[in-house]
Amino acid sequence: MASTESAGQILAGQGAITGWQEDLYKDFHRNPELSHHEERTAGIIADQLTGFGLEVHTKVGGTGVVGVLANGDGPTVLLRADIDALPVKEATGLDYASAAVAIDASGGQTPVMHACGHDFHMSSLLGAAKLFAEQRDAWAGTLITLFQPAEELGDGAKTMVEGGLTGLVPKPDVALAQHVLVHPAGTIGPHTGPFLSMADSVRVTLHGRGSHGSMPHLSIDPAVLASMVVVRLQSVVAREVQPGEFAVLTVGKIAVGAKSNIIDDHAVLELNIRTYSKAIRDQLLAAIERVAKAESAASGSPKEPDFEIYNSYPLTDNNADVTAKVTAAFEEYFPAETVQDYGRQTASEDFSDVPTAFGTPYTYWGVGGIDPQAYAAADAAGAVSSIPANHSPMFAPVIQPTLTTGTAALVVAASAWLGKD
């Protein structure tokens, strides 16, 4: 397979960059930055890409960075990594753990951590870019490396598109991306069709009538109203969504009141839904509105509730032909046990907004980040769910072989198009 031979030639230099790449990863991990505030991170990425000889575009949609490496005639491949971190206080105890603190959207201080693996994504893509730049004889075409801000808010890809992305770079023939997940390190998980779910957050404001805590008869208590709404919503997936269809409806936040002896005049619920189809999404949103309005009416609320949908993520739906080509390249290059279909994931991503803007097919796969022996022991004990997952303050993928596998996966996948015959 010519593409595999090209990938092998490009990856022949991987051992020489391992120390540099691990140091880069640890630096990113120690110095995380919140969504749309990734200035230091973006600066390091831009400097590295410039040093490799790429044409670099900075401040794309705010803090996005794009590098273009033209290497003769051939296809154009876009590789993407996300770069933002989360408002999480790290509890891993690693010697390169984050102690960073930042100002959040509300103006308060918050600890910051790379609790979702974006530090791995950046380091892997920079490693792949360096290897492609150093081995130009092994491939032909154009490589686009896209470093996207604000994935955790679900709007980073859109801001890059709105910032003129499609006019800055050639239209890619294919777009590729990956994510570190709770699977054994050294494995890769391609999947055809829907891979990551759609997601929407919904803010519901319920209206009551305030009163003294000693005079509940003069109130319409929003705490009781909110409780009834939460309980009623638990039946939506269980009793309204057809069995076999995937749906998640989570109430993640209830905010009501300021003091024990004051009955407030409103309550705020923040919910999150995950679906694989627009029809189920619309069904859940309609159910949330119906329940909130009905319970408000039953409580005698002075007015109907208010609804706000925010932090929406598109469906990540992997193109069958692209996924088949990438999977074949993985199976040709890696040992047989390395390539595993992880199946559908309930997490969400905004990566697909980029290829959608170009009208380009794409695929997105998982990369394992958990020590294989620890994962096997947990699996044997039926305790995989006890392994700290993405967004946990204890999330700590092992550096190796996660980093070398993630870098190689990007090179092998891109070489399926860029490799020389």
Image (cartoon, helix red, strand yellow):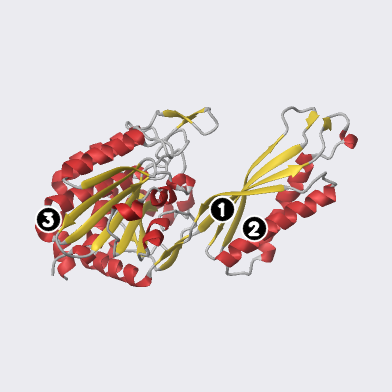
Mark 1 or mark 2: whose residue is earlier in sequence:
1
Mark-to-mark CA distance, 1 and 2 = 9 Å
Amino acid bearing label 1 = Asp
Q: Which residue is mark 3?
A: 136
Amino acid bearing label 2 = Leu
Query: Where residue 285 is drawn, which disc sits there?
Result: 2
Q: Which residue is mark 1?
A: 200
Q: Secondary structure at mark 3?
A: helix
Mark 1 or mark 3: whose residue is earlier in sequence:
3
Q: Is residue 143 left or right of residue 297?
A: left
Depicted 93 relative to depicted 299: above or below? above
Q: Residue at x 18, y 61 (%)?
A: 141
Depicted 33 relative to depicted 310: above or below? above
Given contact means CB atoms under 8 Å apart, are the residues at marks 1 and 2 in contact? yes
Depicted 24 relative to depicted 175: above or below? above
Depicted 3 relative to depicted 143: above or below? below
Q: Is residue 84 left or right of residue 268?
A: left
Q: Residue at x 42, y 47 (%)?
A: 159
Q: Secondary structure at mark 2?
A: helix
Mark 3 or mark 2: whose residue is earlier in sequence:
3
Snapshot quadrant of residue 258 = top right
Mark-to-mark CA distance, 3 and 2 = 50 Å
Tell which of 94 and 171 is nearer to you: 171
Q: Is residue 185 visible?
A: no
Amino acid bearing label 3 = Arg
State the residue lying farthest toward the right.
217
